[in-house]
Amino acid sequence: MIQKKYLLLIGGLVWGIAGFNILRIGIETYAHYITILNILLSIIVYGLFQYFVFQKMVKKHTERIIGYEQEKQLFIKFFDMKAFGIMAFMMTFGIGARVLHVFPDIFIAVFYTGLGVSLCHAGLLFLRNYIRREVYRKVEEI
């Protein structure tokens, strides 16, 4: 059991590490496909995922974590079961698609780079929320 405030920190680290790994795969694949169009497409992928998925997810999970009444929580409570299911599906689909070469490398480069940056950004948002809560709490104590 850990203090609930650390769940935001764990969420930030988990999403940051996941995003870094996806981004690494995208960048490694990108070497042969760097064009203005592909960079713009990666930016669009980033924006779509950030706006429609991760920004909302960070807000939802931050509110849920802050709303826990008990101060001590299991460390896995940084997500709910639905989020773990989505994460498992995304990982299984992503790994399977790459291993089976379902998509061409140019798609992996463009999509994974945009998705990876968006996941890293989600991790940073969780970390920002953790830091804000800690700073706010310290100011209240003064």
Image (cartoon, grey):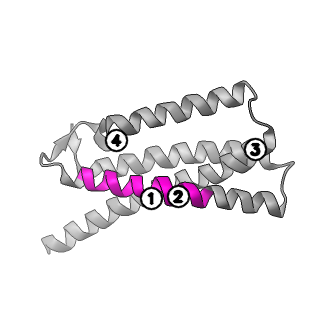
Secondary structure state at the residue bearing disc 3: helix
The nearer-to-camera label among 3 and 4 is 3
**Residue under circle 2?**
50
Q: Which residues are magenta?
A: 46-65
**Residue under circle 1?**
55
Pick the quarter of the image with the C terminus: bottom left
Q: Residues within 10 Å of mark 3 (few under 14, many from 20)?
A: some
Q: Give the amino acid at mark 2.
A: Gln
Q: Is residue 55 magenta?
A: yes
The nearer-to-camera label among 4 and 2 is 2
Q: Nearer the viewer, residue 37 or 24?
A: 37
Residue 107 is labelled as: 3
* Quadrant of res 138: bottom left
> Upstream in the sequence, badge 1 or badge 2?
2
Compared across the picture, whether 97 is left or right of 34 comes to left
The answer to whether the residue labelled 3 contacts the one labelled 2, judged by CB atoms less than 8 Å apart, is no
* Quadrant of res 21: top right
Pick the quarter of the image with the N terminus: top left
Residue 79 is labelled as: 4
Compared with 106, 95 (above or below) is: above
Q: Residues within 10 Å of mark 1 (few under 14, many from 20)?
A: some
Q: Residue at x 64, y 26 (%)?
A: 96
Compared with 101, 127 (above or below) is: below
Secondary structure state at the residue bearing disc 4: loop
- Residue at mark 1 to residue at mark 2: CA–CA distance: 5 Å
